[in-house]
Structure formats: C-alpha cells, structure tokens
Image (tube, rainbow, N blue to C red):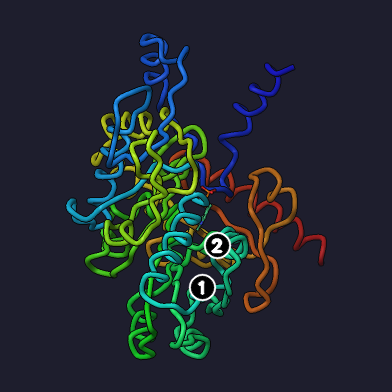
Amino acid sequence: MVEDLAKAVMEQKMHEIGYPGNQCVKLTKFYKWLLKTGLDTSIMNNAGDPYHPYPGTNTLVYERTVIDFFGSYFGFDMSNIWGIVTFCGTDGNNHGIYFGVQYLKSKSKEKPIVYVSDAAHYSNMRLADAQNLEIRLIKTNTNGEMLPEDLEKQLDPTRPVLMIYAVGTTFKGAIDNQKELNKVIEKKNPVAVYRHIDAALFGGYLPFTEYSDLVDRNKCPFDSIAVSGHKFFGMDEPAGIFITTRDVLKAQNPFHVTYLNEDMPMLNCSRSSITPLKFWWLIQHEGDAGWRKQANQLLSNAQWLYKKLKEIEYPCYMNKASNTVFFTCPPQVVVDKYHLATDYDARLGGRLAHVVVMQHVSKKKLKEFLADLILVTKNRKKMEK
Ligand SMILES: *Cc1c(COP(=O)(O)O)cnc(C)c1O
C-alpha cells in the first residue's frame, strides 16, 4: 500500500547520513498557501526567459527574483546576470557545458576540449559525452583536488578550454584550487577559456560562511555556476539554479520563438512554475539569517565528527570548508543502517565511506553513529584475536 511506502520513508529519512539531502524541509505553510489559492488545480509553465517575462500562467517574474537573489552571493553584477531555475544540479551542469561550447564557438573556430577532474561528479562526463565533446580527465591528489601539474601536462592551448571546476567533489568534498589552476591556464595561454563551476552541494552553504570567496566570481572568475536546490536549501524534490552572465547569453543562439516572447536560449522548453515559488518562499522564510545559521552548524558538526573519529584513531579525512567526512569503510551493518555511500581509493588503503553532515544530521545522530562504529570495530578486533 502506498501508505506503507510513506511510513517507510518517514522512518528511514532521519537515518540517512551518507547523502547530501537536507531532511529538514519546511514547506508545510507553502503547501497550505498553495491550496488556499487554488493553484493546485492549475497548470502553470515557465516556458520562456525569466529576464524577458510575459504575462500568463507562469511565475517567470519570481524566477528572475530568485536568480538575482542567489546571483548576488556568487558575485554577479546585477547589470550582467542571467539564469534559470533548473530541475537539478545535473540540469545546471548541462546548461554550463552547452552555454560554454556556444560561447567558445564565438571566440574560436577550433573545437573546445572539456577539462574536468577524475573526482568530479559523473554527470559532467556523461553530459560532455552526450554533447559529443572531447574530455580530458585530470588526476586528483588524495584529497580529491585537481592536480595543477596534470592540467599543465594535458592542456592543449591550440584549442578552446572548457574548464569544469568542482567546488565540493561528491565523495571527498574537495574544492578544486581555482587560483593555482587558473595560473596554469594563464601560463599556457589557450585561444579561449570558459569556466563552469559545479557547486551542487557546496554552492548552497559556502556563501553563508567565512569561505564565501570560494564561490565569488570577483575573487575567482568564472562564467557560470550550477547549484542543486534539494541539497542545502531545503527543497522537497530535485531542483537547482543555473547562473551565468549576459556576455555568455549573447553568444547563444536564441532560436527566436515568437509565441514565447522570442528568447529561448535554454535547453528545455518547459520549466516548473512551482519550483521558483518554493525557492522564493524559502528566501522569505529562511533567508540569509536562517541559511547562515544552518551553514555554520553543518561545518561545526562535521568538524566535531572528524575530531571524534581522530580521538578513537579511526582513519578519517576531511577537506577545508567541507561538510563531508570520509573514512575507512566500516563493516556492512553500519553502512546499511546509515545508508553510507562508499568509494575506493587504493592510496588511502582501499574502501572508503563518507558522512555528509546536512541539517538533520545532529550531534545526537552522530553520537549514535559513532557508538555503532566503535561497537562493530571492537567486535571485529575481538574476532581477529
Ligand atoms: C549531487 C551532485 C551533482 C548532481 O546534482 P543533482 O542535483 O543530483 O542532479 C553534481 N555535482 C556534484 C558535485 C554533486 O554533488
């Protein structure tokens, strides 16, 4: 029965500490409001450009407000900003890669090459593949950061560079060192460069912390950024934002579509009208103060977990500005109970697992996890004796 499914989800959700979903969704009042308005009996569709809205059954005006709000945190100038609310982080990366290719085409006749680290989210490789692009995977250090020396070796300056920087890799939570990598690009002086930032998780919380410079394009210049909405911000289903500049937008083919107010540079025709409203609602009710508090809580709880693991001498690792703690993979019972994600790195002794500290991952939950971890590792040691 579907009721059983709902019950199972409600039971399971608080145990999940291995994936970057925020299980503290606060949209109850939004849904009450929606029911009161009658919008639950309507079809709305944001087909069109949020910066060129037309009246009708859409929320394009609110979509623009949402993009402007987040854009200011990423250092976009309000006179040079464009973007859309996407269906997820992957959708944002797809736009980053597509817009990047079109932009680079306007600068050079040569085909671009995509450079992305081997620790970046697989969607970047998949999307570059779908767009029939040549990809060069750049090696990472044990922290998961792209190696400047390998970029230097692999970068071909005769072809345009489509750079994808990971700001928070999926497994190790590593942030590519844009300053050092940009130095390599500068030194090799390629015919043209486009930089896209994949900040699906970290792009949510970094703007509200002391590390905000890492996603500020005035500090590290980039052309576009993609962030997921359901990771940090507290959306109840997959969503995201994609933000770029008007300079990049101008290089796109608008495919003049008269019945949609002319401008359709984005990949999909239909987009959600409800998602921008939810974002807008969260901006009103959570806003800077709420997100600042949550962001710093995540980082301090992650630090606390890391410290505790060190205290019991459990092999563990954590990157700067990260809410992700990774460690030697514990026995399967622990992996299953907490739905831990696992990975493999021979340089760090083989199998690894991680905890992503989101809003619902309290110290209490982490204490429970630590107690289980200590118990099973003690038992294992006893059995080995
Ligand atoms: C989660 C994640 C993605 C994919 O985002 P979706 O919103 O799940 O499509 C892309 N990149 C990174 C770094 C991620 O962590």
Q: What residue type is labelled 1?
A: Val
| Picture quadrant where residue 289 is located | top left
| Residue on which disc 2 sits | 124
Quarter that holds the N terminus: top right
Instruction: Return the residue nearer the eye: 238 or 68.
Output: 68
Mark positioned earlier in the residue sequence (1 or 2): 1
Q: How far from the left and from the top, in percent, is residue 130?
A: 61, 60
Instruction: State how far apart marks 1 and 2 are (Cα).
Output: 9 Å
**Most foreground residue, 137 or 128:** 128
In this picture, residue 384 sits left or right of residue 122:
right
**Residue at (45, 15) in percent of width and height:** 42
Secondary-structure class at tag 2: helix
Q: Mark 1 points at which residue?
A: 114
Note whether residue 286 is visible.
Answer: no
Q: Do the residues labelled 1 and 2 touch (CB within 8 Å)?
A: yes
Say above or below: 28 vs 123: above
Q: How many marks?
A: 2
Task: Tell me: 381 left or right of 31.
Answer: right
Q: Residue 92 has which mark?
A: none
- The image shows residue 61, relative to residue 161, as above or below, that is above
Q: Residue 4 appears at what percent x and percent y?
A: 71, 20
Q: Where is residue 194 in the image (x, y as percent from the top left)?
A: 38, 70
- x, y (%) of residue 55? 29, 25
User: Can residue 81 be seen at all in this image of the molecule?
Assistant: yes
Callout 2: CB less than 8 Å from ligand 1:
yes
Q: At numbered mark 1, what does the secondary structure look like: helix, strand or loop?
A: strand
User: Local crowd at mark 1 within 10 Å, few (<14), some, or many (≥20)?
Assistant: many
Against 8, is 224 above or below? below
